[in-house]
Amino acid sequence: MNEPEYIEVLSYLRERVRKSHYLDVDDVVAMETRSVENPRTRLENYLKMLIGMACERSNSRAIIINERLGKVLDIESGGKFEGVEIQLSQPEIETFGMSRFTLSELDEVGEFVDQLEIILADIHNEPDPADSGNNMDSQS
């Protein structure tokens, strides 16, 4: 990819994150990466931070919520509290590719992170256009 394509991918990704009602996440990550001038590096940094924040928020909140609810809820049948099911909004369904998940089973949220990691790996594995000029000189 070239610089305009990296900029376009970052813009599209930010738009999707913001439409999924994660304005605060996008704001934080964009603020942290704004000083990076290289579009490829900025996109890689944005993805890394987005992945980190998604993992942190989903895991830590789920554990806290499930533990608290498990302590205070009495199940009429006498069974064990297993977790809360979350129904996602249409923009979230489009972003995450799922309609619901339970806090006790976060594998579905992991799919979103997995997709981001695949994009990051693809970008990381692309040859850097700046390196190609150096290789030409060394081969002469």
Image (spheres, grey):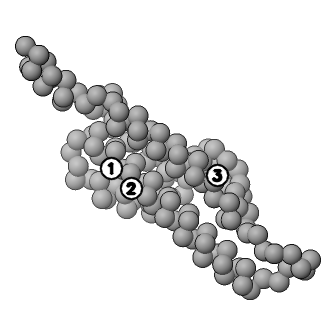
Which amino acid does the dot numbered 1 rest on? Asn
Looking at the picture, does residue 39 appear above or below residue 53?
A: above
Q: Is residue 139 above or below residue 46?
A: above
The image position of residue 1, as x and y in percent, is 33, 27
**Furthest residue in direction right, as rendered:** 77
Q: Of helix, strand and loop, which one carries label 2? A: helix
- Residue 43: x and y in percent read 34, 44
> Which residue does the image show at 57% across and 71% down from the upper left?
61
Report the residue at 27% width, 53% height from top.
34
Q: Does residue 31 appear to the left or right of 11 in the view shown?
A: left
Q: Who is closer to the viewer here, 45 or 23?
A: 45
Q: What residue is disc 1 on?
A: 45
Amino acid type at circle 3 is Glu
Mark 3 vs mark 2, CA separation in Å:
19 Å
Q: Amino acid at mark 2?
A: Met
How far across and down, in percent of the image, does residue 81 sit? 78, 74
Cα separation between marks 2 and 1: 6 Å
The residue that disc 3 covers is 108
**In which quadrant of the rendered image does the C terminus lie?**
top left
Labelled disc at residue 86: none
- Specify the quadrant of the image occupied by residue 31: bottom left
Residue at 41% in and 38% down: 121
- Lower position in the chain sequence, tag 3 or tag 2: 2
| Helix, strand or loop at mark 3 | helix
Q: Secondary structure at mark 1?
A: helix
Circle 2 packing at 10 Å, graded few (<14), some (14-19), many (20+), is: some
Instruction: Give the side of residue 140 with respect to residue 100, left or right.
Output: left
Q: Residues within 10 Å of mark 1 (few under 14, many from 20)?
A: some
What residue would you read off at disc 2?
49
Q: Residue at x 8, y 19 (%)?
A: 137
Whether residue 12 is visible, yes or no, is no
